[in-house]
Amino acid sequence: MKKILSIIIPCYNVEKYIVTCLESVYSTGLHEEKFEVILVDDESPDQVVKIASDYLVEKTNYKIIRQTNRGLGGARNTGIKNASGKYIIFLDPDDTLVLRNYNFLENCNADIVQLASENISIYGDVISAYNPPDIKNITGRKFWLNNLIMPSACNKIYLRSFLNKYSLEFKDHLYSEDIEFNARAFFYAQHVTVKGILIQRFLQSPNSITRNKSITSRKKLFDDLFNIIKYLVIFKKDNSKSLEDKKYFDKIISDVGLGVLNLGLRNSIEKSEIIRVRRFLLDNKIPIFTIVYDNKNKNLFKYILRMPFSINLLKLIFTK
């Protein structure tokens, strides 16, 4: 029986979550012959592989692949290379799969299926939710330009042949790698289907990679977001052929740009580094000061950034 779905689960220091995660996968109602579970052990120092193996001992549709540590993106790439399903879902072990019916994928040929998701606290309360409107067959660029976007790779289902056609992979050892990956994926996607049905719940752990408050983690996140901006500026220059293409990349890069400036101002990042990001955006004609954002606070922040000595002023305010 042809597999409809490959569910890729990177594993690193997640032993306390993995059973709940796997239980959510095997509660979908899909026949085991129709989907596969690919766990990628990214050189995890804990007992996650043993715990997962014990849970899966009577299952027949899983693979456990071990590799030298390559980070979340590298683990997902290994999963893609070893997948055989028509579609791919990325599931982080501290999150849970909620969607129960995947029959619509049987006759679906969308490059990407965008679905809804919820962010939950460690107590199970819903902190926020992403609820996109139902849309049939739109290009990735038009969807990103005209709708509120959540760039996570985990509230989307990807056609495996589409990922392979465009050699779409994540960057290794890069924080917020979903942004860079999806900017390229939606640029190439000619057929995106959007459904306002819940696929996953994301645990908002204070110790996660992007929410960890240590100075080292904050600095790496700042540097990696700046690297994402640089990657996308190069990709834009190499691939933009129309006004729509330019607007698409300008919206994404401007959004990331404001995010990294905000991150730098609120954390122990040198002013010279923050100014360097701002200058790079302006030198590459990214319209951070003129584009209208989805979020009102971003528009206010953008307005303040236009003022003389704004970096010095905001740094003083945010670090008091």
Image (tube, rainbow, N blue to C red):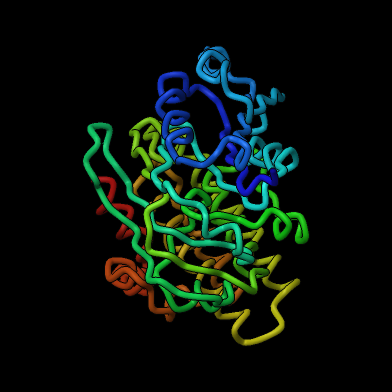
Q: Quadrant of the C terminus?
A: top left
Q: Is residue 264 visible?
A: no
Residue at (71, 83) in percent of width and height: 241
Front residue of 281/70: it is 70
Residue placed at 78% from the left, 60% from the top?
165
- Most extreme residue toward the bottom is 243
Q: Residue at x 55, y 39 (%)?
A: 31
238 displayed left or right of 264: right
The image quarter containing residue 61 is: top right
- Please indicate whether residue 126 sits to the left or right of residue 213 in the image: left
Quadrant housing the N terminus: top right
Q: Position of residue 24 (x, y in %)?
A: 42, 34
Compared to residue 50, the image places residue 214 above or below, namely below
Q: Residue at x 37, y 53 (%)?
A: 198
Question: Considering depth in this image, is 31 or 204 the residue closer to the camera?
Answer: 31
- x%, y% of residue 176? 52, 47
Q: Is residue 75 above or below residue 319?
A: above
Q: From this viewpoint, is residue 247 visible? A: yes
Question: Viewed as shown, does residue 24 lie left or right of 104?
Answer: left
Question: Could you tell me how many numbered marks the image carries?
Answer: 0
| Left or right, 161 with reference to 181 | right
Q: Position of residue 233 (x, y in %)?
A: 65, 66
Q: Quadrant of residue 71?
A: top right
Residue 222 locus on image (x, y percent):
49, 47
Position of 22 relative to 6 (above/below): above
